[in-house]
Image: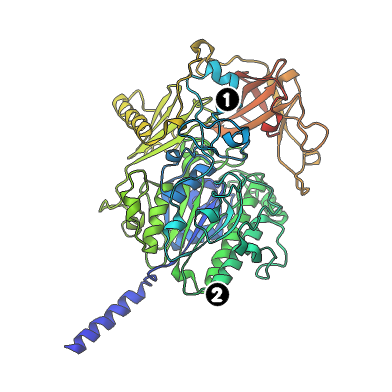
Amino acid sequence: MNGHIIRIVFIHVILFGCVGFPAEQPNILLILVDDVGYADVGAFSARINNTSTDKLYTETPRIDQLARQGTMFTQFYACTVCAPTRASLMTGKMNNRMGMWDAYAGTRTTFEKTQKSVPDGCHILDHEPLDEYRYKKADRAARGMTIPVAATALHDVKTIPQGLEGYDSAFIGKWHMGSHNHEGYRPEDQGFDETLAYFDGGGSGYHRPFRAYAARTTKWDEPGPDLTPRQDYLSDDVAQRVNRFLDDRASQHPDTPFFLYLAHPAAHGPIQSRADDLAYFEKKAKMPGLIGHKSPEYAGLIKGMDRSIGHVLDKLDELKLTDSTAVIFISDNGGHPVFTRNAPLRGGKSMLYEGGIRVPMIVRWPGRTRADAVCDVTSDIADIYPTLMEIAGVDYSDFKADTTTDGESLVPLFSDLKNAKNRYDRDAFYHFYGKLGYGGFHNFATWAALRKGDFKLHYDYQGKVELYDIARDISEKHDLVNSKPKMALDMLVQLTDWLRANCDDDYLPKPNPEYDPKATLRYGPYVRLEPLKASLMSKAGQPKYRDGRPATTLRMDAQDHGIILRYGDGPGKCDRLGARDVWVFEDGGTYYMHYDAAGPKGWLSSLAVSKDLSTWEKKGPILDFGKPGEDDSAGAC
């Protein structure tokens, strides 16, 4: 009898040892990259374009390798911009439950900074309503709904490191979720044991933004020997600092599982790459037949990000931590439409079209995720919190019982890729962006969307509704509102009812009492003005970043106040008679340029369109924003 028991146990150990079952509490490495679009990652771009990675212009060999070793989630959603995604990831809640719907490069308009009284239901670190800030005249008459208040920091919520009992946790990278180092809202105040963070939206790839805010992080200040004696390029520097943390963990606390959240700074602008990568992609751009954008600077930036992630994965191998570490890779939003192409997905960052919110997501957990696997089940960023809790094997019953949480664990999908057993039962995904879309039908309107099953409904607060069958129309070209009016109405009611029931009223748009329908130009025909000629600036005349690397920009010939963008006395100087807040993006084969032009009496919000980036047709002005120069610092020239 005992012999049979021993034999059975022995066979059990052999069989289960072969598939490499993980330890009870694996280490967790969460990598969140910045502004990396779906089509920027080779494995995802090749799949959606039905091609191979060697046919793509952009290269991400190490992330592609990670995808082959784990599971790709092909219908994974984030938010439209940085901060909302980070808030939802850390809490498992829809971003708008917390009022986190915008990206915050500065906090000068918080109630604290302006020393204004805080309305009921708001926080002192919240933004004022933006219609009292930059869009004064636009909101007063031409907007039917006001832009809502926005939160700039997490408050009174439980975060991932606070839920991971028994784990040592560290944060390295871009926080962008704590009102710029306010005590009580920094990573170390949100449960992280070690922190090396910067708090702004982005910065040069050749400066060191980190500050050792927690006392334990001072040992990371000096360069380490594991890559090269000195790392000037930010992506390389980040990898070196992460690897130093991994070395410390392996030598000092080998028996304690760790949670490391790497919030990578790439590929946020300004677009800067290493010289060797730039030279490589300048040469590659001359090769015919490649799919994707042809920007050597951007491709080099993506390559540098991929290389730095590869260094971190190599360190896990070196320390023999790969089999005991779950790695999750995600982007915080779609690719920026100025810098990259998200085709065949429509739109990009700051838009609720697929190009703005569908992002690459990979999970590699040896022994639990399948190699070279694909999961097409729709999921989103709020699912990361409960997923990590289940990976860690910790009790998160409080999360499940909380009616204000939205996420659901993705672990059942690791073994059931098609969700045949329905153990993952989310079927409705709500999105909200309280600011301005960059184009199409969504100029000057708060924007919300609902993905339910294969269908996706867009709704802006000026009354525009669109409906798409994402399974058949991933590019969102064929609006089904007229052919499926009942479905559109049912989804619209579900979306607006959910937002009203689950989001604080202060963080939602409100009817504008000063609205004048006659002043609304959104849906009326634009006035056709003179065409404008555009030319790409030659390298010899390009403005440069502070480190001396050339910047890529677009300028227009001067025609009164028809100038789009022009530099004044030197690099980085904005011509007072030029423009500010210039955005160029491609949608459906047409290039759109939104900008604020300096007119005879004030700033004029304007639009120009082009088919080839050489000849532009001006379609504005749309709205008058006030006197030139009264808010120059808000512009990005």
Q: Residue furthest top?
A: 518
Q: Is residue 559 left or right of residue 402?
A: right
**Residue on which disc 1 sits:** 132
Mark sitting on residue 595: none
Residue 404 spot, x, y in % from top left: 36, 43
Residue 587 spot, x, y in % from top left: 54, 32
Q: Is residue 105 left or right of residue 487?
A: right
**Residue on which disc 2 sits:** 252
The quarter of the rendered structure image containing the N terminus is: bottom left
Q: CA distance from mark 1 to mark 2?
A: 53 Å
Q: Residue at x 68, y 63 (%)?
A: 221
Colour setup of the view: rainbow
Q: Residue furthest right?
A: 569
Does the rendering let one see residue 50?
Answer: no
Q: Residue at x 50, y 17 (%)?
A: 523
The quarter of the rendered structure image containing the C terminus is: top right
Secondary structure under tag 2 reads helix
Rate crowding at label 2 as few (under 14), some (14 to 19) or many (20 or more) other CA atoms within 10 Å: few
Q: How many marks?
A: 2
Q: Residue at x 72, y 58 (%)?
A: 232
Rate crowding at label 1 as few (under 14), some (14 to 19) or many (20 or more) other CA atoms within 10 Å: some
Residue 414 spot, x, y in % from top left: 35, 58
Between 74 and 285, the residue placed more toward the observer is 74
Does the rendering let one see residue 36?
Answer: yes
Q: Is residue 272 above or below residue 323?
A: above
Q: Is residue 609 above or below residue 548?
A: above
> Sequence-wise, which precedes: disc 1 or disc 2?
1
CB under 8 Å between callouts 1 and 2? no
Q: Amino acid at mark 2?
A: Gln
Between 294 and 383, the residue placed more toward the observer is 383
Secondary structure under tag 1 reads helix
Q: Amino acid at mark 1?
A: Glu
